[in-house]
Image (cartoon, rainbow, N blue to C red):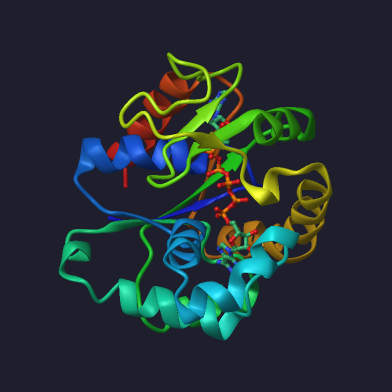
Amino acid sequence: MNLIFLGPPGAGKGTIAVKVKEAFGIPHISTGDLFRQHIREESELGMQVKQILARGDLVPDEVTIEMVRQRLQDGDTENGYILDGFPRTIGQAETLEGFSKISGVLNFELSRESIIRRLSGRRVAKESGRVYHLDFNPPRVPGRCDETGEPLIQRPDDQPEAITKRLEVYDEQTAPLIDFYKGRELLISVDAEPAPDRVFTDVENILKDI
Ligand code: AP5
């Protein structure tokens, strides 16, 4: 089961991907998480993409595609995977077709108002990247990760200016993928407005038919 989770920033793709990973035993491959890991490790790639992520722009296709191509060669993808945040351009989607066969594309749909509320209130654990929300999923101790106690921070690209930029980039470069995958009869809509458990139940039901 090779899945793509498509949708605007903050739609809850990562939150649901973590649950699907646990329930179905397939890896969650988030290009955003991979880039952030490189940034934390101060690798060459991390230094190259740090400012791009902070601004809310897209990393060039050739860099992103090569990172995903390599990741999909790991043994843990044998029974499937969830691609979260990839592809994000038509060029990425066309190239992906050359090296992997996709079973379904789940398109997470959410109003702009909800997107902005989710992104503005998101807090993440500094090292592990575990995701919280000030209103919808607050930590037990304010400002601290429940699992590790490490500090919670706001992602640089969750600042208002970067949010505006990410939404523009989504409209221009990623939203066209909806028609691209409709044309291939792979697109399945997910109502991302309800609480995470409800969204997950809907996704579980969808995945039974894939
Ligand atoms: P990436 O990390 O992929 O960012 P994104 O797509 O903007 O997605 P987010 O992580 O913001 O949101 P999400 O949908 O996963 O929501 P989440 O579950 O966290 O990419 C970051 C950057 O990397 C890009 O801007 C780009 O620079 C670069 N990049 C990545 N991929 C690339 C590519 N393919 N090509 C080029 N560049 C690339 O939820 C959000 C918040 O809402 C959380 O606080 C959560 O607790 C809360 N929440 C979630 N679900 C619910 C719910 N149902 N109800 C209430 N609250 C909820």
User: Who is closer to the viewer here, 167 or 109?
Assistant: 167
Can residue 209 be seen here? The reply is: yes
Q: Is residue 55 above or below residue 65?
A: above
The picture places residue 173, in percent across and down from the top left corner, at 73, 66
User: Who is closer to the viewer here, 158 or 169?
Assistant: 158
Split into 4 quadrants, where in the image is the N terminus? bottom left
Q: Residue at x 35, y 71 (%)?
A: 101
Q: Residue at x 42, y 36 (%)?
A: 16
Q: Is residue 184 above or below residue 207?
A: below
The picture places residue 137, in percent across and down from the top left corner, at 50, 20
Count the labels in the image.
Answer: 0
The reply, left or right, for residue 85 in relation to residue 37 is right
User: Who is closer to the viewer here, 121 or 68?
Assistant: 121
Residue 2, quarter of picture: bottom left
Q: Is residue 1 above or below residue 206?
A: below
Q: Residue at x 51, y 72 (%)?
A: 46
The reply, left or right, for residue 199 in relation to residue 52 is left
Residue 180, quarter of picture: bottom right
Can residue 97 be seen here? The reply is: no
The picture places residue 64, in percent across and down from the top left corner, at 52, 76
User: Who is closer to the viewer here, 198 or 169?
Assistant: 169
The picture places residue 142, in percent across and down from the top left corner, at 52, 18
